[in-house]
Image (cartoon, rainbow, N blue to C red):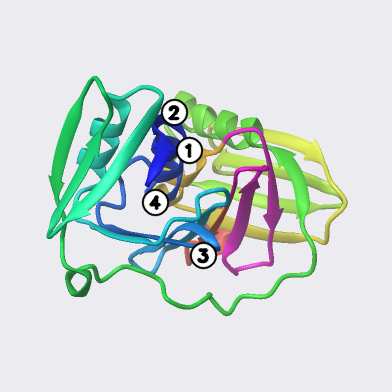
Amino acid sequence: MKIDSKKLYTFVKKTTLNGAIETCVIRGSNEGLKINVRNGNAIAVYGLLKDVKDEITLPIKSSTILLNILNAFNDKITIEVKGNMLKIFNEFREAEIVLSSEEFIENELKEKVPFEYSGDVSVQSSILKQALKNKEIIKGDTLVVEVKNNVLSILTGKVNFDKMIEKTKVDYADCTNELGAISFDVINVLEGLVKLSMKTDYPIKIVESDEEKNIQYFIAPLEVNKDEK
């Protein structure tokens, strides 16, 4: 398989949440290159790199090591599998990674999650990233994502205590969810325009898509006492 190293690096980074999800299986077919993976029961990620059509199966035991190796390359690379070794090379550099066995990768998603939504809303990922910065400013713990009267707000902090809120106008039904620390890894890898789908106390769906890739994230909300917000 031949592929641009930075394109594959970006795809692996976004689907493994920059290595926060350590193991995965990269599967290539005529549908494209896929990584479908979960982080416990809190996050599900479905990633598709559209223009890669090679038949390949790569059970990765350390996405962090793979990312570090890919980041050391520039331009086109060739990927070959011999036995349990993954060879990545071009005319200037060569690396080998020991692959896992598929049966030892327990977090691969082989079916779609059964969640349904009524439409979506497009927002810039920068509003989510700024909400994370706000959390650091006031030393908050969570993000409360709410749509009310066609305004999307992302609050960190608590009522009657230190808090900061990001807001943007949307056309979407009222709903609210609270996201904990495990969701922050998703926000950190988002770029550009994303689509959000939400219901109250229901996993939030975030889709980042362009002509090269489509990545869907499903993030479970925290179970909290709403009187404490």
Q: The disc labelled 1 sits on which kind of residue? A: Val
Give the crowd class for mark 1: few <14, some 14-19, many >=20 residues within 10 Å. Answer: some
Front: mark 1 or 4: 1
Question: What residue sits right under mark 3 in the picture?
Answer: 225
For residue 192: magenta? Answer: yes
- The residues bearing labels 1 and 4 have C-alpha atoms spaced at a distance of 13 Å
Contact? badges 3 and 1 (CB < 8 Å): no
Q: Which mark is residue 136?
A: 2
Decide which of tag 2 and tag 1 comes sooner along the chain.
Answer: 2
Q: Which region shows up in magenta?
A: 191-213
Query: Of residues 53 and 167, which is closer to you in this image?
Result: 53
Q: The disc labelled 4 sits on which kind of residue? A: Ile
Question: What residue sits right under mark 4 in the picture?
Answer: 182
Query: Of residues 127 and 19, which is closer to you in this image?
Result: 19
Front: mark 2 or 1: 1
- The residues bearing labels 3 and 1 have C-alpha atoms spaced at a distance of 29 Å
Q: Residue at position x 55%, y 55% from top?
A: 178
Question: What residue sits right under mark 1 in the picture?
Answer: 189
Residue 197 in sight = yes
Front: mark 3 or 4: 4
Q: Residue at position x 39%, y 32% from top?
A: 5
- The residues bearing labels 4 and 2 have C-alpha atoms spaced at a distance of 15 Å
